[in-house]
Amino acid sequence: MEPHPDEPEEIDGAALHATIRRFREHHALRIARTGERLITRHRRVLQALPMLYHRNHPALPGYVGPDVPQGIAGFRPGRTETVALRAVARGYVEPRLTAHREQLDAIYLMGSGGTIGQTRGSDIDLWVCCDKLMHAALWPKVRLIDRWAAELGLELHTFLVDPEELRSRRRLPGSRMPMLVLDEFYRTGALMSGRFPLWWLIAEDDPARYALAAERLLSNRFVDPSAVVDFGPVGAPSPAELAEAAMTELDRALATPHKSLLKLMLMESYARSPALGVVSSEYRRRIHAGETDPVALDPYLLLYEHVARDLAQRGRHDEVRFARTLLIGKAAESLSKRPTRNVSGPTSSLLARFAAWGFDHDAVAHFSDPESWSIRERWSEHRRIVRALSHGMALVESLVGEAAGDGTGAAERVRRLDGPSERRLRPLRAAVARLTTRHPGCIAELHPALVGRRRPIPLELGRHAERWVIREGRHVVKACRRLVEAALWADLNGAHLTPARSGGPPSRRLAQVLHAIRDARGRVCALVNAESGDQRVPPWQPHGAAGEPSDPTLLSQRNDPLDYGGFHQLHLDTLDLIERDEEGRWRVDSLTGEAGVLTGLGRLLARPAAEVAWQVVGGRERFRLAQRLAELHRFACRVLERPGGLFVMPFGAEIVTVRRHGETVETRRHASLEALARYLDDAGSARLEVDPQSPRLSGVLPAG
């Protein structure tokens, strides 16, 4: 009904009751579909929830005492609720009461339940509506019921809502977004028991017109006041609300892009095209028009249509297709198996709609199984998501700025937002930058939602033109200078590498590198190549072919692997440092040649030993060398943590000194003990320590 403030229209009582019936039928269908997607134990919990709040009995879950608000207005338990209650509380017997209290207005299911967005992992949000004066007495019961559901494996979140507080003061405890939450409630909430919203019957969002229509309905008894609860209309969201919601959705999009980027687009539409109204108003309009198709009334489809209409009006037609893929990606999560061609009902209607958009049955089936995607498909989707994240970050920055200058009476809310918003923006900027910005040495990573772990993507590793090349079929998907870069890239992005030539050195070396990377997670991985020859030489060639014969006695257990007084040279060719930078990016810094390796060793030895995992690629003696380096590090870092500390260690036929100068570390090589003695005389350090495991250096400390 749409009454005009000056010329009230006649109210059709039959039309009102038909509207109420359609709302109730759609809500009942939503609740039934929610239960169908739950396992039996969880479905019983859902069905029993109204009775747990309608009755207050020691045999029921959540009982805390006799003086707890109970009784849901107008609720008369049916067989479904009674059976469910007996299943979860076998000792309960329904009392014969001539009268009972009705202190609670209503209970609503809210969120993705019963929509195309519900998955097996979806939680359950519940609104229990009552006067705020009852909240303190009811909260202990709420917490116990939520905890009881969690013990049964169902994630339940219950909120106490005072309708009068929300309607008259536009306040919703625990939320900075009351109008946006109310909009979401009206389009996703499903009445489980109690009073229905008066909003169902009033096709007005302007507060004055809404209030006039409400007064006419109630005062003229077209609607029984005891049968309705009034949360009020959805007012225009303030800049502060939109900024808060945009930050929340951008944060969530870092984990669940297909759902949250679509909601972020909705926040942009609300901010930039307020004339389009809100999604809940479209839902109500369709019910008033007689719509009963559950797919046409699905909250996620309504959200997409609102976003697509806004994008088209603003000339951003290319983004409409991306919005469609976001919706399909979210809907695909709710399919417990790949869709077949013999489906019917809402699923068939949804697939027909997707087909009309150009996504045929096979495409949707493929979308519903992201673990089957190729690496190229994942990177293509990643680039689309990254562009949306970058745009979302710019939107958030703009909305926060607009909120800070809001002069529409929300000054207190803006002040609360302004400080915390900056603290929230910093990690958001860093997280978005980590996915969108490339830096030398950093390993490119897919969006986390696109990294499959259940079925690693099979890729082939080969060698071409001094590069390690990763192929998917005939397509080159990655080329790396170092083997460790290729291995880390594959490990981070859920791929399994198979050398083009199976067996032999390449397979062994790749396996060692992968083991080293995984074993060092959370710490800096210091990966030493202790084989003769360089990794730039194709590893499947014999070392002799490269002109660098290997010497299997180099790592003899009879000698200290760092002290080669009796050998010609020490084959520590490279040192790869694998770590995460301050912004969370994985990076590889490769140091080559003895000078580079020594510089890297010096820097690492000055770091706390707990931060570094020493790993070695090589022959059978690699474990012994790794253990030796770790032991050396534990001793050296105690010396080098002090200002001016100087540490002496062997390095093949030479001797190395590592000295701390403030925040810098100096590494020097000395050809003999005499050269070392001359250096120590000039250095004059009183904080000199020598590697205690080197017999050759055992006399240096007394002499120093």
Image: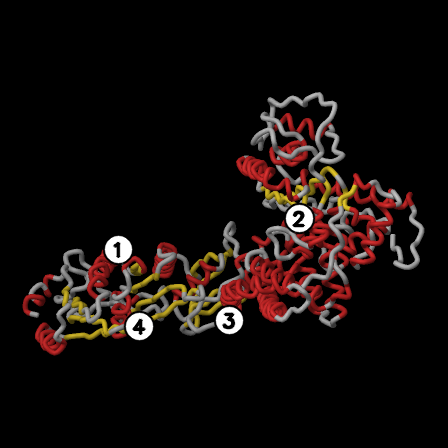
- All told, the count of numbered labels is 4
Mark 2 to mark 1: distance in Å?
54 Å
| Cβ atoms at labels 3 and 2 below 8 Å apart | no
List the residue tagged with mark 4.
Answer: 592
The quadrant in which residue 537 appears is bottom left
| Residue shown at the point (60%, 59%) measured from the top left | 249
Mark 1 to mark 4: distance in Å?
21 Å
Q: Mark 1 vs mark 3: which is more N-terminal? A: 3
| Residue 195 as seen in the image, left or right of residue 531 | right
Q: Mark 4 vs mark 3: which is more N-terminal? A: 3
Residue depth check, mark 3 versus mark 2: number of the one nearer the observer:
2
Q: What kind of element bears circle 3?
A: loop
Residue depth check, mark 2 versus mark 4: number of the one nearer the observer:
2
**Amino acid type indicated by mark 3:** Thr
Disc 2 crowd rating (10 Å Cα; few below 14, some 14-19, many 20+) is many
Q: What kind of element bears circle 2?
A: loop
List the residue tagged with mark 2.
Answer: 111
From this view, report whether residue 395 is shown above or below residue 306. Answer: below
* Residue 575 coordinates in the image, percent (x, y): 31, 67
Q: Mark 2 vs mark 1: which is more N-terminal? A: 2
List the residue tagged with mark 3.
Answer: 437
Q: Mark 2 vs mark 4: which is more N-terminal? A: 2
Q: Which label number is shown at residue 623? A: 1
Disc 1 crowd rating (10 Å Cα; few below 14, some 14-19, many 20+) is some
Mark 3 to mark 2: distance in Å?
34 Å
Q: Between 504 and 71, which is closer to the camera in this rendering?
A: 71
Mark 4 to mark 3: distance in Å?
27 Å
From this view, report whether residue 211 is shown above or below residue 536. Answer: above
